Amino acid sequence: MATPVEVPDPAKDWESQRKSFIGGSEVYELLNVPQYGKGCVRALAYRKLGHKPDYPLQEGSEDLFARGHLLEPIVATLYGSATGRKLRRPPMDDDGHPIPKRNAAYPWAGVNTDRLILAGSGGIAETGDLEIKTRGEGPWWRVKRLGPQTGDILQPQWSNFVTSHKWSSLVELGVFGALPMLYFDREADPELFEVFKREGEQFADKVYVHGELPDPPFPAEDRRCKVCAYRLTCRGEEIDAAEAAIVNEVRNGKRELVQIENADLAHTLAEVDLLKAESKAIEEAIEIAKEQVMQQLGTVEAARIRGYGKVYRLPVQANYFNAQKLKADNPTLYDKYMVHKKTGEFYIRAYPE
């Protein structure tokens, strides 16, 4: 028997509706799959229970999400034109919010599918679900090379889990150049649905029924913890001692936290984060390509590749001082000899949401 959860009246505010179910864009968090610097079931629980984050969303930082919503109908039109498939938008409420559909047997599972792909069009025999994504140039080329990220694969599968449709399509539009587009069709995966049921039931019982938080699913050293909106409440100084000290100064009144209402500044910071993400995606693609080169070279240490040039396979050697280990093993020695000196220069520590 499915875990019972309260289903708010559809006429009530959209935020209450959204907190009352796990949506397709949150499945990677439910399953602790790393993506977008996130992917933690405990952070998902904090949000569903309405806990105030340590680092709230600032004005302007939702620009990237707004971009996706703005381009969604354009992507749908391009997809329909490229495939010959007819699409229909799910119903919306009076305020323009999508009306979520819930799994008939598991009401904690809901979805706002971007579009329905109608049977009888574009050679399609059965109705399917369409999920739409827009990507900057770096992330799009990563998808082109390696395929969709795991979280993006999970989302249309979750939609199938809720709607009972037998297949889905994921479309990824590159927001650059001539707006290149990729799409991936996949059949529904019943084995994955069993994972959804198991993990979703555990989450619903613990969070929705008992109002409790799941245990932290991974060590505090995980990079997902370091950018989590709830990191200090959840893991405290395990995460970032320097940031904890800054926040404590603010809380104790030693340093004033200035609220800046500047959409341009928020947009610039969001752009920095986007560029970092794209740079990271490119670096990952480079590392994968290098690994392919290593495999093709085999044990050859020096070679001349016709059509390219010379290549050498050299051993890697790293030498560094592990200050964090010293601090953990011998804090007295660390405090005695580690010098902290202000240089007069400044740098930025930014924690986006």
Image (cartoon, rainbow, N blue to C red):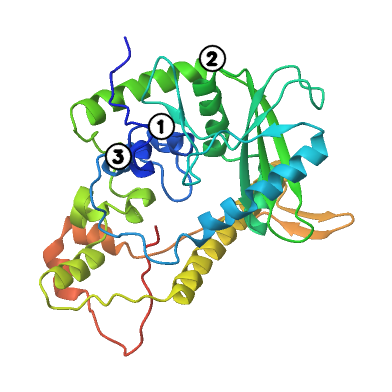
Query: Is residue 101 positioned above or below 315 on the image?
Result: above
Q: Earlier in the sequence, mark 3 or mark 2?
A: 3
Q: Earlier in the sequence, mark 1 or mark 2?
A: 1
The residues tagged by marks 3 and 1 sit, at their Cα atoms, a distance apart of 15 Å
Nearest to the observer: residue 249 or residue 128? 128
In the rendered image, the residue lying farthest to the top is 1
- On the rendered image, what quadrant is the N terminus found in? top left
Give left or right: position of 51 versus 102.
left
Q: Residue at x 60, y 55 (%)?
A: 70
Give left or right: position of 167 versus 111.
right
Q: Nearer the viewer, mark 3 or mark 1?
A: 3
The residues tagged by marks 3 and 2 sit, at their Cα atoms, a distance apart of 27 Å
Quadrant hosting residue 347: bottom left
The disc placed on residue 190 is 2
Q: Residue at x 65, y 57 (%)?
A: 138
Q: Say what secondary structure mark 3 lies in.
A: helix
Residue topped by disc 1: 31
Q: Amino acid at mark 3?
A: Lys
Query: Is residue 228 positioned above or below 259 on the image?
Result: above
